[in-house]
Amino acid sequence: MADNAVRKVRDDIENGIVAGEFAPGSRLDEVTLSKRFGVSRTPVREALMQLSATGAVELRPRRGAIVVDHSPQRVYEMFEVMAELEGLAGSLAARRCTASDRAALSAAHERCRASAEAGGTDAYYYDNEEFHHAIYAASHSGFLAEQCGALHRRLRPYRRLQLRVQNRLRASFDEHEQIVKAILAGDEEAARARLRAHVVVQGDRFGDLLSAFAERARP
């Protein structure tokens, strides 16, 4: 079973949940989904298991996968926690990163530059994922990397949704530039502050998120 086939099905289901195509509390039927996406039930089953691990769906005996209802307030709270974890990872990375960490972070940043210039939100999202994972690795805290990774996966569809807001992709990359500079300079406080601001949703960005939620709920 190809990993990219599972990832595509998983991402399509996630997008459908965020877009309101799969309503909270609704059942995701493997047979229906396999026909919809033109794949066998095996990648669908694996995708649903991955979504269960991130809290997007709940696997129930005799009912299968049920879409979990995450309110905007719940998502906002997850972003708050994510911002603090990312800030800590950035601070530790600025203090602890090695030459190989710097090279990995710079390479991930350049891949983000290429996808940002191409304007592809999905391609940028995956390069952005690698960028953040490079920071987690550079923190040299295995437990922190695990916690960041778990919450990053839970917020994956909402972070993709954010990137579709006008000008957010370019702004995200510009923020990356400042984060990289702080980490490579060994500036712990700047790295913490810039990563926290990069992730947290407040003010206009919270308004944009609420607007995106409202848009997905329209028939």
Image (cartoon, helix red, strand yellow):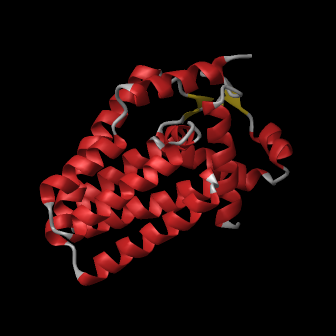
Q: Quadrant of residue 100?
A: bottom left
Looking at the picture, tell me which residue is in the foreground, 62 or 67.
67
Looking at the picture, tell me which residue is in the foreground, 195 or 126.
195
Q: Residue at x 51, y 62 (%)?
A: 127
Looking at the picture, tell me which residue is in the foreground, 15 or 178.
178
Please give the count of numbered marks on the rendered protein: 0
Check the image and name the residue furthest to the bottom.
99
Looking at the picture, tell me which residue is in the foreground, 54 or 21.
21
Report x, y in % for residue 48. Answer: 62, 44
User: Which quadrant is home to the C terminus?
Assistant: top right
Q: Residue at x 69, y 67 (%)?
A: 2
Q: Which residue is drawn at 57% across and 38% down?
A: 166
Report x, y in % for residue 56. Answer: 53, 36
Q: In this view, does 52 lie above or below 46?
A: above
Report x, y in % for residue 38. Answer: 85, 51
Q: Quadrant of residue 12?
A: top right
Residue 69 can be seen in this image:
yes
User: Which quadrant is home to the N terminus?
Assistant: bottom right
Q: In which quarter of the image is residue 199?
A: top left
Q: In this view, does 127 lie above or below 74?
A: below
Q: Which residue is drawn at 17% across and 61% down?
A: 92
Report x, y in % for residue 32. Answer: 82, 37
Left/right placement of residue 146 relative to residue 214 reads left
Q: In this view, does 2 lie above or below 35?
A: below
Residue 25 can be seen in this image:
no
